[in-house]
Amino acid sequence: MIIENKSGANSQIGAVAVARAQPDGYVLLIAPDATFAINQHLYPALQYDPFRNFAPITAVGRIDQALIVHSSVPATSFQELVALAKSKPGGLTYGTVGAGSSMHLNFELMQQIGQFKLLAVHYRGGAPALSDVLAGTVSMMLVSPAPAAEAAETGSVRLLATGGLQRLSNLPNVPTISESGLAGFEAYTWVGLVAPAGTPQPVVDKINNDVRQILSDADFERKFLAPNMLKSIATSPSEFAVFMKNESEKWGNVIHEIGLKIN
């Protein structure tokens, strides 16, 4: 297998390349949720359609995001953070990996449900955003739980909550946002695997079966999924298609509510 990292424009570059590839099963796209559920609502001139240009193979993995705040922020729980945000609307900042990213939209949904206001600071990637949170330039961010836990150990930030409906087994003492006042709220990112539209169904089914075997392998779970706090969400191709449409509808509503468009 040859891996080509075609990043950029919220994953559009890689998506367009695979959408235009031969549908023979030898060129695949593994990409984050924005590619399949967000971009079509943000970019009026998007050069691919996630539902018409791809053959869904399987959802691959999900990461429940973790909420960290700089140690200077006077809040030691999610409830205290919400109260602080309500007392000074727009006075607290949060970093994202870019406008329209799942990190950005999860914060927007959180504010809608919790009825408080934060100020977004958009970066070109997670590393500079995390660096500024560690330095106290930005108040908080949502980040993958593994680097969040490492950052919290330094004392520069506090890990207040995680974004799943259940606590993470690796972080059993960290509450979820849902149990901390926003019942049912989830903040997560996911990755999916697709082929170009027109790929023969037997080929799609064969790849799906192979990937699901790998994701259910005990050694793979122990060596890769567990250390990265990544959950397998492997599905059938038809189940993944439904999942993509549900996610697209969810984020389309959020984007419409905040009036976000990117040219």
Image (tube, helix red, strand yellow):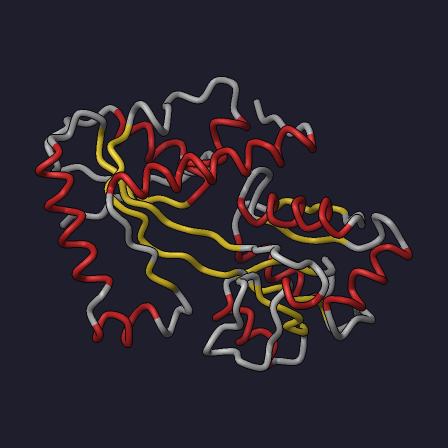
Q: Is residue 224 above or below residue 137?
A: below
Q: Is residue 175 left or right of residue 2?
A: right
Residue drawn at point x = 64 percent, y = 63 percent: 177
- Residue 28 seen: yes
Residue lying farthest to the right in this orientation: 87
Marker count (numbered): 0
On the rendered image, what quadrant is the C terminus found in? top right
Residue at image point 52% right, 19% down: 44
In the rendered image, residue 14, in percent from the top left (x then y), is placed at 33, 35
Q: Residue at x 39, y 42 (%)?
A: 243
Name which quarter of the figure residue 35 lies in: top left
Instruction: Judge left or right: residue 235 versus residue 201.
Output: right
Q: Which residue is farthest top?
A: 45
Q: Residue at x 57, y 42 (%)?
A: 98
Looking at the image, residue 182 sits to the left or right of residue 16; the answer is right
Give percent across and percent down for residue 109: 65, 45
Residue 134 visible to the viewer: no
Residue 76 location in percent, x, y? 76, 75
**Left or right: where 25 falls relative to 49:** left
Residue 241 spot, x, y in % from top left: 33, 37
